[in-house]
Image: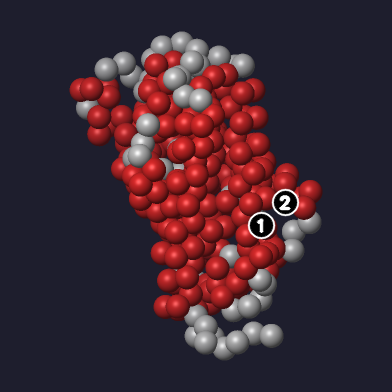
């Protein structure tokens, strides 16, 4: 298995960024809805596996977190394979091209806003139809688990949510970067699972995942209103941007792009 060298990877990422910012709106919306649904799928898998053994969380919380961490990366793996547009991954991927003036910061902002919004649509649609209506969290222990998850996330102080958001998307964007470095299915599988599983086990905050976890709990009766939902989503989103754009996209571009100081027209 060959691994793409970092300078070549930066060139590849710049090309990907150029392609992403040129995607027509309707196609971008569809790909973003699909990605939001995939992340929600990973979310319900993590709840089902992690909380499916009664008493495990109190007796062996590490095992419960490990089971959740093993399941959640399915969402990113499907996005990588089927080309979904994920806000958090794009926080890093668009930075080298923007830094090289291949497209403008306005194009990046427009892309991020569009993808974030339609990721939300996809996550909500999946949560309502395939989790709530399907009754996946109606029975115990899932009912109590999803309510507790939603309430604990909504109760996080904004500063804590922001810091945890940085760490979560640092891990997610490292996974995306690793996926771009390898070209075989097993390698991409591992590239998704290791960093993303790590952030789930450690309890960091991912904005698109929370578009599943918190609304799913709200639908089951969690004491969370819309203000509390956005009290979590907004600082987590800001943290995700910092973790992806600065700690991966900008940092790796500075470290590994041999043309980083050459102005583009």
Q: Give residue 131's mark.
A: none
| SS assignment at label 2 | helix
Q: Quadrant of the C terminus?
A: bottom right
Query: What residue is shown at x 43% (from left), y 58% (from top)?
Result: 243
Q: Position of residue 129 (x, y in %)?
A: 64, 23
Q: Is residue 15 above or below residue 236?
A: below
Q: Give the mark, 2 or 1, whose residue is nearer the N terminus.
A: 2
Q: Nearer the viewer, residue 7 or 199?
A: 199
Query: What residue is shown at x 61% (from left), y 23% (from top)?
Result: 128
Res 186 seen here: no
Left or right of residue 65: residue 128: right
Instruction: State if disc 1 and disc 2 touch (CB < 8 Å).
Output: yes
Query: What residue is shown at x 39% (from left), y 38% (from top)?
Result: 70
Q: Quadrant of residue 18?
A: bottom right
Q: Tell me how far mark 2 sits from mark 1, CA to CA.
A: 9 Å
Q: Is residue 213 above or below residue 107?
A: above
Most distant residue in the left direction: 59
Left or right of residue 244: residue 117: right
Q: Position of residue 222 (x, y in %)?
A: 45, 19
Q: Which residue is mark 2?
A: 28
Q: Position of residue 68 (x, y in %)?
A: 38, 33
Q: Give residue 111's mark.
A: 1
Res 128 seen here: yes
């Amino acid at each position: 298995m060959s691994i793409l060298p970092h300078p070549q990877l930066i060139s590849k990422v710049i090309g990907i960024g150029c392609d992403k910012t040129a995607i027509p709106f309707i196609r971008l919306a569809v790909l973003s809805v699909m990605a939001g649904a995939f992340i929600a799928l990973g979310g319900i898998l993590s709840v089902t596996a992690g909380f499916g053994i009664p008493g495990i969380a109190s007796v062996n919380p590490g095992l419960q977190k490990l089971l959740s961490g093993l399941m959640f990366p399915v969402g990113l793996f499907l996005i990588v394979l089927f080309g979904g547009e994920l806000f958090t991954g794009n926080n890093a991927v668009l930075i080298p091209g923007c830094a090289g003036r291949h497209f403008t910061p306005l194009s990046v902002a427009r892309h991020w806003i569009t993808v974030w919004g339609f990721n939300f649509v996809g996550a909500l649609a999946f949560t309502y139809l395939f989790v709530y209506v399907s009754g996946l969290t109606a029975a115990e222990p899932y009912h109590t688990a999803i309510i507790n998850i939603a309430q604990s996330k909504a109760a996080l102080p904004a500063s804590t949510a922001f810091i945890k958001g940085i760490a979560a998307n640092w891990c997610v964007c490292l996974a995306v970067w690793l996926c771009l470095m390898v070209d075989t299915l097993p390698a991409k599988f591992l590239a998704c699972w290791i960093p993303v599983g790590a952030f789930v086990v450690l309890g960091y905050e991912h904005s698109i995942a929370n578009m599943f976890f918190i609304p799913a709990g709200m639908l089951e009766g969690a004491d969370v209103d819309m203000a509390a939902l956005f009290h979590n989503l907004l600082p987590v989103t800001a943290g995700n941007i910092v973790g992806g754009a600065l700690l991966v996209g900008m940092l790796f571009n500075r470290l590994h792009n041999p043309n980083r100081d050459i102005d583009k027209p």
